[in-house]
Image (cartoon, rainbow, N blue to C red):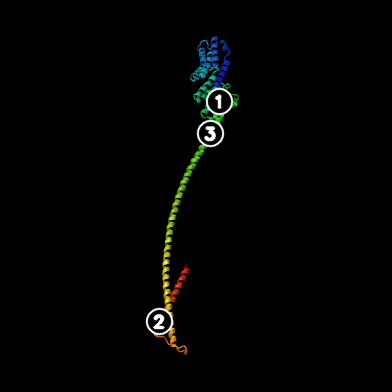
Amino acid sequence: MHATKTLLTVLLLAALVAIPATAQKAAAPAAKSTLDKGVELFGQEKYRDALDLFGKVMSDPKASIERPEAAYWSVLAYLAVGDQATAGASIDAFISAYPKSPRVPDLLYQRGRILYSKADYEGALKVFAAFGSQAPASDLLPAALYWSGECLYALGRLEEAERAFTAVTQGYPSSVKVEAATYRLSLIGLEYRQRELLKLLTWSHEESLRSVEDFRMREKAYESSIALYQKQISDSKRGAANDSDKVIADLRAQVADLGSRLASSEAKLASALAEADALRASLAAAQAGADQAKAAAQPAAAPARPTVPLDRDSKTQALDSKARALDLLGFYIDKIAAADQKDGSK
């Protein structure tokens, strides 16, 4: 509200200065007095009362000189009370009726503000451009540049908005819009960084999606490889177990056969030993009998005489004992040779 009041005060002083001296002299005293009173009420922020006086001046047929000024101040009063629709229509009517008036650039600026408030940014840009071309030396030009930048900023045309705000800060350092333009420039810088960050995040997200997809594909491949490897290991273990069982069974069968053969050999050996012992006893008995018979046939003190042959039964018994002893000796020799051969094969 304070900024609006300041702006209106500036416009009021400019309007008072811009009234031609010849027009003031030629104006009817009543119309001039009414116009001045209305401007005074406008300065006191009594806008409705000022509008009534401005309306009287514009309806006075004798106030042809004061009428453009009354129309101009009426526009300002409508803007002050917030009646933008009537203010816009009044501006159009003023420009149509007084196209050569020095007030036209100011009213163009106000129309641009009205269009901006209605979010008609493209229309506002055109009006501000027309204002700049008609009043390049106007005190309102920095403000027009600033609002042009606001329109561009709202449209997302950040580069153009940055140029407009930079023109305000660098070209008009004493303007009241410098601080606001500087703030907008900082926001544009943030917008740039946000855009870059968004691009980076988008790229990172896409890269992450590609990485995740690649990871999933690799994971599936690894899982398939692991499953196949586990199957091969299981099959190998199963086959190895079967082979081990077969080998163990074969070994056990061999051990059992060897044990059986060993038991049989031990039994045969024990039987042979017993038979040999019996043969040795029989041979010793036969030899002893033969010795006794020989001693009985020859006296101890008598001289030696030819040997008396044994009878047939004794001789036959001795020969049989000798044959069995020889057979037993051959059997043991075979057993010992077989045992040595077996130990050598191991």
Mark 1 lies on residue: 146
Mark toward the viewer: 1 or 2: 2
Residue type marked 3: Gln
10 Å crowding of disc 1: few (<14), some (14-19), many (20+): many
Q: Nearer the viewer, residue 261 or 204?
A: 261
Amino acid type for the residue under numbered disc 2: Gln
Density class for disc 2 (Cα within 10 Å; few <14, some 14-19, many ≥20) is few
3D distance between C-alphas at marks 1 and 3: 23 Å
Q: Secondary structure at mark 2?
A: helix
Give the number of the mark in front: 2 or 3. Answer: 2
Cα–Cα gap, marks 1 and 2: 154 Å
Q: Which mark is residue 317?
A: 2
| Foreground disc of the pair 1, 3 | 3
Residue 182, image x, y percentages: 57, 28
Q: Which mark is residue 205?
A: none
Task: Please give the residue where the numbered disc 3 appears in the rendered image.
Answer: 194
